[in-house]
Image (cartoon, rainbow, N blue to C red):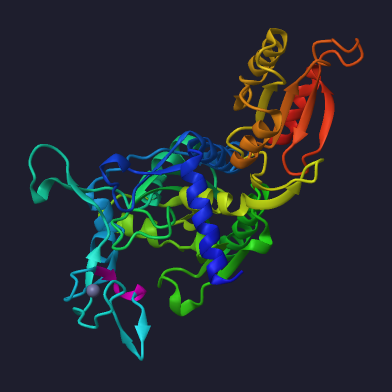
């Protein structure tokens, strides 16, 4: 796709997200706040489906994984030990002409010289390190002693609680800890919609193992994670696995894969899978003075476990799901009239609303009552939308646009007006094919559950 087509596609996606209630600018009525976003009624359902499925796959369905939920603010000593206080920074330059601030590594370049993307000036300050951690103070006194940071990643909580979790869960290596939670980075230039935000959510795994298994398990997790993306509707063909060469990896990492998705704004990282050796636990042993070793009671060996870290972004994946699902197609009705159908082709598992339920006519009490009965039947099990306004075709289009995979219509057959054979059956219409089938109301719940679980 050409650059223009991609820009246009992204604009349509952003506009749809706002129009239908997926994503809003944070604090919009006050002019917004750069790098912060709110998820509306549909966005929050999409994100919840994604996080729930990740949790199910990586925690509930496995014997070798447990979960945790750490605090966002931790003892500052954690960030000294991890190296974040010292080195978690981006090179920042100021434009002396327009006073704009930019990340040096993102500056455009012409004839070998970098220039300001705002005003084109080449009068830039030398780069200086800007720490990306948000600062605050715990307690009423704003002193150096009370300085705290909003966590820039969820990972550290899993390292510092390693021993508690090992002792209480009685797991043997290899085993992992999983966590989903907010993280914060004071990005110099937030950009690409929700992709690079200052507040975001992560889904991280720390998978602890013996050193001899580290490389093998890194490849194992790469495969697991690619399967996961496939199972939520992002095919392998759309993900580029970037095997990071040694000179670009962190010095302690023996292997790192970046999983990049082809967003309309370019290939961008969805997830990193890093074999971090024993770096993190060793640092915390050094700084806390506490023993975080593992004792293998079969081999009688005592050692610091190595770790493989699959780290994914919730917001990035949600955005990838929307970008992957977005489609426009020209459809022609029976009278030969063409129109553009906007449809989000979400995997039914991820779709914010699973089923639309419509009475054919809103002024026919028996139809409305039956439709509401079906809504009540489905609601304990899935998100359902009831809609009685406008013609059926229009109601289908409204659901297509938010990615609802199935719609059922209650008509005169359902209430037995055309004979007993079709009584208590409904029309079930599938989003992608637009095909309709007749299905007994009694089978509806299980039929849908099979498709969405
Ligand atoms: Zn400038």
Seen in the picture, residue 447 relative to 327 is either above or below; the reply is above
Seen in the picture, residue 444 relative to 179 is either above or below; the reply is above
Point out the image quarter for the C terminus.
top right
Q: On the picture, is 59 further left or further right than 150?
A: right
At 61% from the left and 39% from the top, the residue drawn is: 351
Seen in the picture, residue 222 relative to 122 is either above or below; the reply is above
Count of marks placed on residues: 0
403 vs 240, nearest the viewer: 403
Tell me the quadrant of ligand 1. bottom left
* Residue 6 appears in the rendering: yes
Kindly indicate the quadrant of the structure image that contains residue 124.
Answer: bottom left
124 vs 329, nearest the viewer: 329
At 41% from the left and 38% from the top, the residue drawn is: 69
Q: Position of residue 187 (x, y in %)?
A: 31, 59
Q: Position of residue 245 (x, y in %)?
A: 51, 77
At 53% from the left and 68% from the top, the residue drawn is: 4
* Residue 206 appears in the rendering: no
Q: On the picture, is 81 further left or further right than 445?
A: left
Q: Residue furthest bottom?
A: 111
Seen in the picture, residue 224 relative to 29 is either above or below; the reply is below
Is 255 one of the magenta-colored residues?
no
Kindly indicate the quadrant of the structure image that contains residue 422.
Answer: top right
Q: Position of residue 343 (x, y in %)?
A: 64, 45
Magenta region: 101-106
Point out the image quarter for the N terminus.
bottom right
Q: Position of residue 179 (x, y in %)?
A: 46, 43
At 56% from the left and 49% from the top, the residue drawn is: 322
């Amino acid at each position: 796709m050409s650059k223009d087509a991609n820009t246009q596609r992204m604009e349509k996606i952003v506009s749809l997200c706002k129009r239908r209630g997926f994503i809003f600018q944070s604090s919009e009525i006050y002019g917004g706040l750069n790098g912060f976003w709110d998820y509306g009624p549909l966005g929050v359902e999409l994100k919840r489906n994604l996080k729930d499925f990740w949790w199910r796959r990586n925690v509930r369905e496995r014997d070798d994984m447990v979960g945790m939920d750490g605090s966002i603010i931790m003892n500052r000593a954690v960030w000294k030990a991890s190296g974040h206080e010292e080195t978690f920074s981006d090179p920042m330059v100021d434009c002396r002409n327009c006073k704009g601030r930019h990340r040096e590594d993102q500056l455009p370049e012409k004839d070998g010289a970098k220039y300001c993307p705002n005003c084109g000036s080449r009068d830039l300050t030398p780069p200086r390190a800007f720490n990306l951690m948000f600062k605050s103070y715990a307690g009423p006194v704003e002193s150096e002693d009370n300085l705290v940071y909003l966590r820039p990643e969820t990972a550290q909580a899993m390292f510092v609680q390693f021993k508690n979790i090992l002792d209480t869960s009685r797991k043997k290596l290899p085993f992992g800890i999983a966590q989903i939670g907010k993280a914060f980075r004071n990005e110099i230039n937030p950009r690409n919609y929700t992709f690079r935000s200052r507040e975001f959510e992560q889904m991280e795994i720390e998978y602890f193992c013996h050193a001899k298994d580290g490389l093998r398990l890194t490849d194992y997790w790469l495969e697991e994670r690619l399967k996961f993306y496939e199972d939520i509707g992002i095919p392998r063909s759309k993900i580029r696995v970037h095997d990071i060469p040694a000179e670009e990896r962190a010095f302690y990492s023996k292997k790192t894969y970046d999983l990049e998705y082809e967003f309309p704004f370019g290939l961008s990282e969805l997830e990193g899978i890093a074999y971090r050796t024993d770096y993190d636990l060793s640092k915390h042993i050094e700084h806390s003075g506490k023993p975080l070793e593992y004792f293998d009671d079969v081999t009688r060996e005592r050692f610091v476990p190595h770790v493989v870290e699959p780290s994914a972004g919730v917001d990035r994946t949600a955005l990838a799901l929307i970008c992957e699902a977005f489609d426009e197609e020209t459809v022609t009705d029976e009278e030969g009239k063409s129109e553009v159908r906007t449809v989000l082709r979400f995997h039914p598992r991820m779709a914010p609303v699973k089923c639309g339920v419509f009475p054919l006519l809103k002024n026919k009490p028996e139809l409305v009552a039956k439709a509401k009965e079906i809504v009540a039947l489905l609601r304990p099990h899935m998100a359902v939308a009831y809609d009685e306004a406008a013609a059926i075709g229009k109601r289908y289009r409204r659901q297509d646009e938010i990615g609802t995979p199935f719609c059922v219509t209650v008509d005169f057959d359902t209430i037995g007006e055309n004979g007993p054979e079709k009584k208590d059956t409904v029309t079930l219409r599938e989003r992608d094919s637009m095909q309709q089938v007749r299905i007994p109301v009694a089978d509806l719940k299980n039929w849908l559950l099979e498709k969405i679980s």
